Image (cartoon, rainbow, N blue to C red):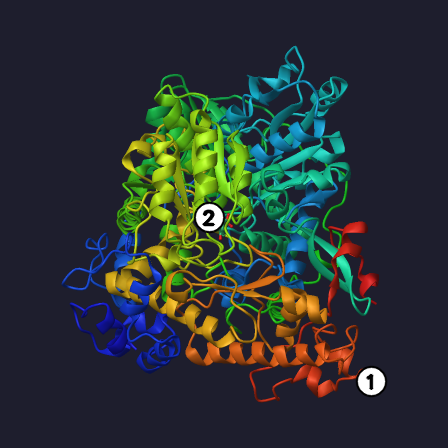
Amino acid sequence: MSDNTMSETGSDSRPEPSELRFVDRHIGPDAQAVATLLNTIGVASLDELAAKAVPAAIFDPVTADGIAPGLEHLPPAATEAEALAELRALADSNTVAVSMIGQGYFDTLTPPVLRRNILQNPAWYTAYTPYQPEISQGRLEALLNFQTMVTDLTALEVANASMLDEGTAAAEAMTLMHRAVRGSSNRIAVHTDVYAQTAAILATRAEPLGIEIVTADLRQGLPDGDFFGVITQLPGASGDVHDWAGLVGQAHERGALVAVGADLLALTLVTPPGEIAADVAFGSTQRFGVPMGFGGPHAGYLAVGSKHARQLPGRLVGVSKDADGSPAYRLALQTREQHIRRDKATSNICTAQVLLAVMAAMYASYHGATGLTAIANRVHRHAGSLAAGLAAAGVEVVHTSFFDTVLARVPARALQVQAAAKERGINVWMVDDDHISVTCDEVTTDDHVSAVIEAFSGGPAGGPVDFVGADIATRTSEFLTHPAFHKYRTETEMMRYLRSLADKDIALDRSMIPLGSCTMKLNAAAEMESITWSEFARQHPFAPASDTPGLRRLIADLQIWLSGLTGYDEVSLQPNAGSQGEYAGLLAIQAYHAARGDTGRTVCLIPSSAHGTNAASAAMVGMKVVVVTCRANGDVDLDDLRAKAAEHAERLSALMITYPSTHGVYEHDIADICAAVHDAGGQVYVDGANLNALVGLARPGRFGGDVSHLNLHKTFCIPHGGGGPGVGPVAVRSHLAPYLPGHPLAAELADERTVSAAPYGSASILPITWAYIRMMGAQGLRSASLVAIASANYIARRLDEYYPVLYTGENGMVAHECILDLRTITKTTGVTVDDVAKRLADYGFHAPTMSFPVAGTLMVEPTESESLTEIDAFCEAMIAIRAEIDQVGSGAWPAEDNPLRGAPHTAASLLVTEWNHPYTREQAAYPLGASFRPKVWPPVRRIDGAYGDRNLVCSCPPVEAFA
Ligand SMILES: *Cc1c(COP(=O)(O)O)cnc(C)c1O
């Protein structure tokens, strides 16, 4: 393709034999296909298309050598082999030390069967959030196992399907308790011995909500006064294992709820939070087989008693039944809660950590209760012999009751001990000048324990020393008794289980996933390859900086590249999803106003078309959301905006606007919109989720934005993992740079506005984005945007006569996605967007985005990665479905019995002796013939969501349910 598309965007400065150019692997349409796209659209070149679609006022024309402004600093595109060699060199400059730092991150042995079949398997990592449950049963089952694992281990009744990390899970626990208590108190008591990053995130989150944190040693009991909640940790950050039953009783007497940050491995031995009547448990599932990865990604967890189930933020998988009455899984209770409740939502979480939750759940399945308990006992024994060895060497061990972490008092010698351990290749944690803590994990050996004792004593460790420490094995209840946790203990069984689950789902390895706003583009193998290298994966986020020069270099490269292509001055990679980037960006805006003494600016203008996370994030920073209306053509109503900006002038803090808009068009007025907000003293937040329509064409930091978040899991190739991980960097102009996220444990960052548990968030997946940018180069990135726009406009042209395209911009062009309006069709035929979405599964396709941002519509985003063949097949399926709709409209098929209403069709539902429907079985299963494309058989029929919400079941159902 390059010859054509590249000539549109300038010549490649370093010609390569074409088979080596990554851009040709990444971009679907080749030169001939691009010509077809352009011909259908009615333009002569990609550049003409861009000039027609993108408003001239913001359009960046390329320089003479074909480079878009802002991309000059990118090195020329590397081949896959070259990029991997550079990543190898970066990896090799890191040191993989033995990590005994603890503090919420533990080395773990990822079972190779899970690494290969989940983490390195596109059937798992390229899936999207399971909004279409009928073709997502595999990952929904895996997530139900995750929820069951968490509820069993914590002994609480309901757990959600992952939080972004432990620290934000603690913050969500705090706000959940605040909502649930609804009392007069705004005070929360937090134990002194929670992780530093947890305390920092709680402080960030509490401040704008007017929550007062009282930090105290809760082992001494609850401080005086009223509280709505209490947060403590088990074990504490210092390793202390304390019985919190007394505290829970005391808190309940005063009307406060209690949340315990609990280590799931420890809970195989220690009495779980649910059995001491705690209301909430939160934590991380990282040590269940998910590499530390310099901080992430990992799945956090949050569990509550059933009376608080409806307060749970994030996504909850529930059991329901399908049209034939068979059990089936789907997301329960307001699947996309922020879209419905907006600023009243329980949280702004959208993308979570599904892939990592699947890993952790399968780790629990693979080991089972006995295996996990054995691992926990081994970890505990190592900690015990370490404590004994230290005591024998005359070192004071502070706590007698511990699980995996031993706290040693070494007056004025901590630095020296840390250095001595480092000489032995071991990282320990220096608490302060007088204390060192050492954490054992699954990977710890007797040799590691001996080496640490030597580091403390300066001489050789004595012979093996027996375990010391209190008996912490107080748990008597069973856990993980469901067959899901003992059927898959051999590698053969686990391999087949993972395959059978993946086979139920449609991920990018089977079909295009034309989800508008989600940018489901290729996640190339070369991009993915390095994330499991131990030099990246086995890094503790608080390891000495000297261990991680390669990762730090990679982070710095990305910050420069992303700044350049967005036109901003600085970037923080800390936020773990787009929602978290929004939150961080709005915090920066609030801090900026406050620093100028401009207090009282609390109003956030948000267009009615905005993504639900925008309003939810604004509420989290204590802003009042004022909705700006849209015009009939979908654009923000500039008059309404001006009126509202004027009305709230003194109080205007920010405008949050998505560009190109969630309606899939480049609004012409964007520069005027930004100016109107600036004139009123407000800041402009440009939601950058749609950056795939801008890279190399226009820069939000130059056309009026003060801050944006980007979704590296959309535009920049991090796979969606079935609903996470994500990375949501926040990019700012220089005046906001001082207010970017900080971290208490990263010397190079300020100790303020911490939004994620790790300083660089989900650092171990950053090599994916690095490799993408490195291999595409400046021209390749611009080509990607152009082809994405061309493909979307092509679909808009091809489908408009069947399903009217709702909004177009200047010259009748859409941006990188288009909205198909089915509302008239629904009104005249009764066929709904649901029917069309489910019917697409019969054709072998994943549905587009349903009813966002406009109810009753489908939003289609093809991305640049889909070939013309695939795009044409999708269009043919949509056109054939339109013909089916007409059969319903004409009365040939009854409204209640037709292939649309009956979709999706399982094999079992067709293989019946009596077939009593007005359409044939062939029409049901092979509407365009058996050779149209490979048949994907949906495993269940249409799922009854309302039934599942009325009969809420959120853990593994008994096997008899499937009889
Ligand atoms: C995806 C998206 C978000 C939220 O991003 P997450 O990573 O899912 O939190 C916000 N705004 C828009 C327009 C989006 O498309």
* Residue drawn at (33%, 26%) of the image: 416
Residue sticking out furthest to the left: 64
Circles 1 and 2: CB distance less than 8 Å? no
Quarter of the picture containing the C terminus is bottom right
- Asked whether 112 or 246 is in front, the reply is 246
In the image, residue 558 above or below residue 845: above
In the image, 924: left or right of 730?
right
Kindly identify which residue carries mark 2. 636
Which label is found at residue 498? none
In space, the residues marked 1 and 2 are separated at their CA atoms by: 51 Å
* Residue drawn at (68%, 69%) of the image: 835
Crowding at dot 1, Cα within 10 Å, few <14 / some 14-19 / many 20+, comes out as few
Residue 81 on image: x %, y %: 28, 68
In the image, residue 962 above or below residue 698: below
| Tally of numbered tags | 2
In the image, 623: left or right of 47?
right
In the image, 434: left or right of 564?
right
Which label is found at residue 915? 1
Crowding at dot 2, Cα within 10 Å, few <14 / some 14-19 / many 20+, comes out as many
* Residue drawn at (44%, 34%) of the image: 645
Type of amino acid under label 2: Val
Residue 791 on image: x %, y %: 41, 71
Q: Is residue 727 visible?
A: yes
- Asked whether 218 or 808 is in front, the reply is 808
Locate residue 246: give its quadrant: top right
Residue 875 on image: x %, y %: 52, 77
- Mark 1 or 2 closer to N-term? 2
Type of amino acid under label 1: Trp
Q: Secondary structure at mark 2?
A: loop
Locate residue 546: give its quadrant: top left
Does ligand 1 reach within 8 Å of label 2's beta carbon?
no
Dot in front, 1 or 2: 2
